[in-house]
Amino acid sequence: MKRNRVNIVTLGCSKNTVDSQKLMRQLEAGGYSVTSESADPADIVVINTCGFIHDAKEESVDTIIRHAEAIRKEGRGKLFVMGCLVERYRKELSDSLPEVDGWFGVNRPQEIISHLGLAYRRELNGERVITGPSHYAYLKVSEGCDRTCAFCAIPDIRGRYISTPVEELVDEARKLADGGVRELILIAQDLTLYGTDLYGRQMLPELVMRLSAISNLEWIRLHYLYPSDFPMEILEMMQDNNKICRYIDIPIQHISDKVLKMMRREHDSAGTRRLLADIRRMVPDAAVRTTVIAGHPGETEKEFNELTDYIREYRFDRLGAFRYSHEENTHAALRYSDDIPEKTKERRVARIMELQQEISSERNASMAGNIVRVIIDRKEGLFHVGRSQHDSPEVDQEILVTGGKNIEPGTFIDVKITGSTEFDLYAEIRQ
């Protein structure tokens, strides 16, 4: 008997990726044939949307329309839409896109599974279908957020911060490692808060310690550490435990006290500077990644120059810059006027990235001759493409390696850096 084929299309962040993979496992166990991002016609298409900022919302709507049109032309198939965009705009979407067969928000996978005629299997919690490379995976340690950043709609979309118990995460990580995962990337809207709701204290250090005891895992990477109440014990663990990547993703968003206050961030300029200096002092070989927002209400040229001066001074290893987006029902949208012209925002973002390009180019050039351990992600033309512990997949630079034949993805090798560009390194396998 032919099984119904379901194509899961995932947009947005890695947290959505985890949600889609767990949904795929439920559907697979229920007898469906599941694929991810397939261009071929399927009996059912499920689009997991992002509704965070304007560009992401546009991409989500465009994707829905494109698949609805393909189903119409094919003359068969069902289209279901889930995720953050639906949570924010369910009524508006259902009114304007009647061709969609069902709308489902976030945090309720049981609803879509039930709609497809299956019973939700709780015994499959922690199991998923890995899409993409099988040697690394994201581990979502919590849902939602308790921060009240002025620009952010996530708390309204995803709800309050809810940690997943340590034992469940360790069990999930073991299953992933048994399935071939070698690099585990911990994600949350805010890793810093992990465990405070369940255990009354920060539990990230204990979780990381438990995960590092899993023998098949080689690297554990931490994403999205909020600057306020930063768990300093993590830095001490990095000094002693080679499984914990020397990689600190800490989104500061700005350095001006005026802008930070308008953003409703829980850290100020002086505290941020002290923390980042401590990170450099305690783990000098760590790569520090951050994100900043340009064009937030209240940011004049004075505050913008304060930000670029600090970027130039601190010399972040990795940096992403985003143009401020006025999001409905956020504190910033309700309280402030979005009075900075879009061209000014774009100019500021371009200036930040130009500055970061200079920093990255200089940092990469200084790597020449260094011996670096890398994990191979794929083969591309003449190169094996890999990453060091300082580089996270999809968002950071890569190392293009020559030498060796058909090295399997997930293999760790030592390479010698031979050259560089602004955002990539070249290397040869160490002889």
Image: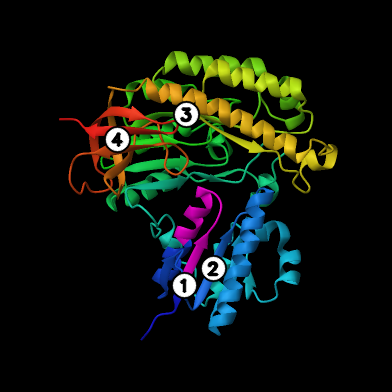
- Kind of residue at badge 2: Val
Residue 146, picture quadrant: top right
Q: Secondary structure at mark 2?
A: strand
Q: CA distance from mark 1 to mark 3?
A: 37 Å
- Residue 149 visible, this orientation: no
Left or right placement of residue 203 versus residue 386 in this view: right
Q: Nearer the viewer, residue 189 or 372?
A: 372
Residue at the spot of label 2: 46
User: Residue 374 shows which numbered tag?
Assistant: 4
Q: From the top left corner, tell me how far across and down residue 198 is, in percent.
A: 55, 40
Residue depth check, mark 4 versus mark 1: number of the one nearer the observer: 4
| Mark closest to the chain's N terminus, 3 or 4 | 3
- Kind of residue at badge 4: Val
User: Residue 339 shows which numbered tag?
Assistant: none
Q: Quadrant of the C terminus?
A: top left
Residue 276, picture quadrant: top right
| Mark closest to the chain's N terminus, 4 or 2 | 2
Residue 1, picture quadrant: bottom left
User: Residue 6 shows which numbered tag?
Assistant: 1
User: Residue 248 shows which numbered tag?
Assistant: 3
**Residues drawn in magenta:** 6-22
Give the class, few, some or many, for how many residues have Cα within 10 Å of label 3's Cα (few <14, many ≥20). Answer: many
426 in the magenta segment = no
Q: Mark 1–mark 3 contact, CB under 8 Å?
A: no
Q: Mark 2–mark 1 contact, CB under 8 Å?
A: yes
- Residue 241 visible, this orientation: yes
| Mark closest to the chain's N terminus, 2 or 1 | 1
| Mark closest to the chain's N terminus, 3 or 2 | 2
Q: Is residue 138 above or below residue 117?
A: above
